[in-house]
Image: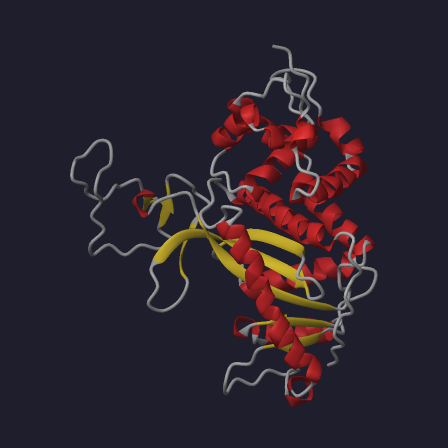
Amino acid sequence: MLCLLSPESRVPQHHPLRRVKVLVDGVLRDLSPLFDEMYAELGRPSIPPERLLKAKLLQALYTIRSEALLVEALDYNLLFRWFLDLNLLDPVWDNSTFSQNQNRLLQHRTAELFFARIVGLAREHGWVSEAHFTVDGTLIDAWASLKSFQPKTGIKPPTDGDASNPSVDFHGERRSNATHESTTDAEARLLRKGKGKEAKLCFGLHALMENRHGLCVQAQVTSATGVTETTAATELLARQLDQAERPPQTVGADKGYHNAELVSFCREHGIAPHVAQIKDRQVKGLDGRTTRTLGYQTSQKVRKRIEEIFGWCKEIGGLRRTRKRGVDRVGLSALLILSSYNLVRMAKLLGSPPRPTALATA
């Protein structure tokens, strides 16, 4: 029996992925000069960078936990083939080729440019606030167990002798990032999130959200130690100052940012620091003249939406515990997942007029 069928005909006209595809294809067209430089002439067969990026978006959007399962799904899922502009007879690349080709994304900073272009597209549609922002950070569990956190001297702790999965006895041993490191991921750092919490090997994810529609406009992955949340926040704000047409007016944050470093940075650049206050802590530049305003109260309500970004990235995008190793690869994965989050939000906004933003003053 002969059947003429295209993946396009099997996708419902009102499927939400159609709007996402329209947005993604527009961004990829703008980045086509970069992709021309990325095609490999020798060695392994190259995956077109456009399809590589779109495949990573699918992995985040549909919570596919590994690239092996993603490649398997691309072979038979008509929706995924349509999204990647593959017909029914096009072969799907090998899983190892998929992994190796991601190195090109790191070399050409493709994820950063892709994320920035998505934010730029949202700005062109009027969906991004240029005045009011929120900053916050979260932890990403590393793909390494505490068993792998061993002394740098090479002296291994005693085990029960099981060759495949030994039980390690850390009783009475004092472990720290200065004396120990993970044999699985040397860039992961041991950190305790708070009192009464267990220590974990993790990375730090920091994000800057615009307050109009809750889109992420800046992001950075760092080591869990050595870079404080405040330092990362000032770097994100400095990047926003360089890239935006006009400087931010306000930035909201939780009590973890109630310190002189962030407040003085904001005041120096004309930004009103709408930071939640710690009781009995006095910081120059943040007092009742700021905290009594309606704008401050609005920022304190809106800033909680940044937790929706982190929640989506961890639960849907699979970023609660990353499967990548090293700051660079975790950062690449995080930017693509954040790009997916922005695209979902933008797809819902596509075709509807932007809502007026609430006024906020210092």
Q: Which residue is outermost to the top?
A: 1
Coloration mode: secondary structure
Residue 232 image position (x, y, % from top left): 60, 60
Q: Which residue is drawn at 50% across and 26% down?
A: 72
**What x and y, as percent, mark residue 250?**
71, 73
In the rendered view, tell whether residue 270 sits above or below residue 217. Answer: below
Q: Is residue 255 left or right of residue 338?
A: left
Q: Considering the image in quadrants, where does the N terminus appear? A: top right
In the displayed structure, does residue 345 sit left or right of residue 159? Answer: right
Identify the residue at image location x=65%, y=76%.
274
Quick one: 322 or 325, which is closer to the camera? 322
Residue at the extreme front? 1
Front-most of residues 105 and 158: 105
Q: In terms of image quadrants, where is residue 136?
A: bottom right
- Report how many numbered discs are placed on residues in the image: 0
From this view, report whether residue 327 is shown above or below residue 123: above
- Position of residue 169 in the picture relative to residue 277 (left or right): left
